[in-house]
Amino acid sequence: MMLGPEAIDRISARVLDRSRAAQTEVVVITTDSALTRFASSAIHQNVAERNVEVRVRAIDGKRAGVATTNDLTDDALDRVAARALEVARHQPADPDLPDLPQPSELLPVDAYRAETADCSPLTRAQMVRTICQLALERQLDGSGALTTELTEVGVANSRALRRYEARTRAGLLTVVMDDEGSGYAERSAMSVDDLDAEAIGREAVEKAVRGRNATRIEPGDYAVVLEEYAVADILNYLAYMGFSALALREGTSFLRGKLGQQIVDARISIRDDGREPGTLPASFDYEGVAKQRVPLIEAGVAAGVVYDSRTAARDTRESTGHALPAPNTFGPFPGNLVMAAGDTPKAELARPIERGIWVTRLHYVNVVKSEQAALTGLTRDGTFLIENGEITRPVKNLRFTENILDAWNGLGEISRERLLIEGWGGGTLAPAMRLERFRFTGVSDV
């Protein structure tokens, strides 16, 4: 159930009126989420959760404090305003603390779909049933989850800034498996109606059937096709390792000293854009600053990083609208990653490969060295040998250890198709890609 802009404005106004801080920020986040989880081709959990969080940031000189509550009574709002100021007064002075943002031009986005907000348990069950039936037809077990969520975000501060937006998202993922093989498929969308349960189920079932009786191959350097799921994983880790202004300043970003330089193949372009069609849009961040379209890698060149108010003030820049909720030691984060599509149909990516590996998705990914964009992890739920341009047989999962920038400098082709995959804080719109070399360093028996 939506609170709506009027109710959220009343909450913010009460806190701002009662706060005695020099500057005050109020962030109101409502969530109305529902989850249908299934395993062994049957629903085993159906839950719904509603919550409202009021986050108050009080600034007293060069000190800031944050307090939160989900009690919306006037007394509770008065107390949280006082508590935030009390917390601020016990903090050490922060010479880099900027003022809160002032109002600026904001172009709203259409981020809400009623069919997602109103999605019933019956509708979710019918979608899940479709996948389970497809799995059972092939003597497989279907598992996974279907989530629908409505979020309202309101940001107000004592410098006259006022923002409100309702956002919806839906996500469906499934792992279909037996003792011999497994398959995976996933989609995210603003509208639950855009999730094709039958197509998702068939994709996972086909992978699981094809993945039966996998054989072991020796690790080494192989040409690969990375499906959209694997590319999305890599993009999210690159965001974590290097697309933040704080990571750049602290020297942990792989972009350090490379802005303006060619770092990967010129056909690779990545941006963060909260207004991108076909994603999970958002027009402002958790400071109420309008989200900007930020080129991160443009035609292979290291183009930029994202900023919040704090990192922008340090670098004498403008915030790009990528603040996370305060208090936040992580810095700004790109939550709407978009990688440019190529011209090659996904089905044709493997054709030039004499002997290589087809990778559906990655698992247990970890950072080896963030300043080198080096990752390690495992393949999962659909790893196949490519021979003479054709997928020939399933192989045991492999461990990879790779410098992503080096791998991307050996780009073969990028698919023209892209999928929206749930990312870290938003959606990631990713294509599939062929790479001429990808380093596998071990074999998993799982």
Image (spheres, rainbow, N blue to C red):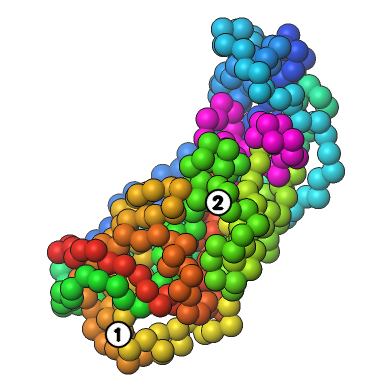
Q: Which residue is mark 1?
A: 355
Q: Considering only vertical position in the picture, is 316 above or below 299?
A: above
Question: Does 35 sit left or right of 213 as displayed?
Answer: right
* Amino acid found under the numbered disc labelled 1: Arg
* Amino acid found under the numbered disc labelled 2: Leu
Foreground residue among 171 and 308? 308
Q: Which residue is mark 2?
A: 255
Q: Quadrant of residue 327?
A: top right
Mark 2 → mark 1, Cα distance in angstroms: 33 Å
Question: Does 391 sit left or right of 446 as displayed?
Answer: right
Q: Point out residue 264 in the picture as x, y percentages from the top left corner.
A: 53, 66
Q: Residue furthest bottom?
A: 388
Q: Earlier in the sequence, mark 2 or mark 1?
A: 2
Q: Point out residue 193 in the picture as x, y percentages from the top left corner.
A: 57, 65
Q: Point out residue 234 in the picture as x, y percentages from the top left corner.
A: 44, 59
Q: Which residues are magenta?
A: 309-335
Foreground residue among 240 and 77? 240
Q: Quadrant of the N terminus?
A: top right
The residue that appears at 74% across and 17% down in the rendered structure is 23
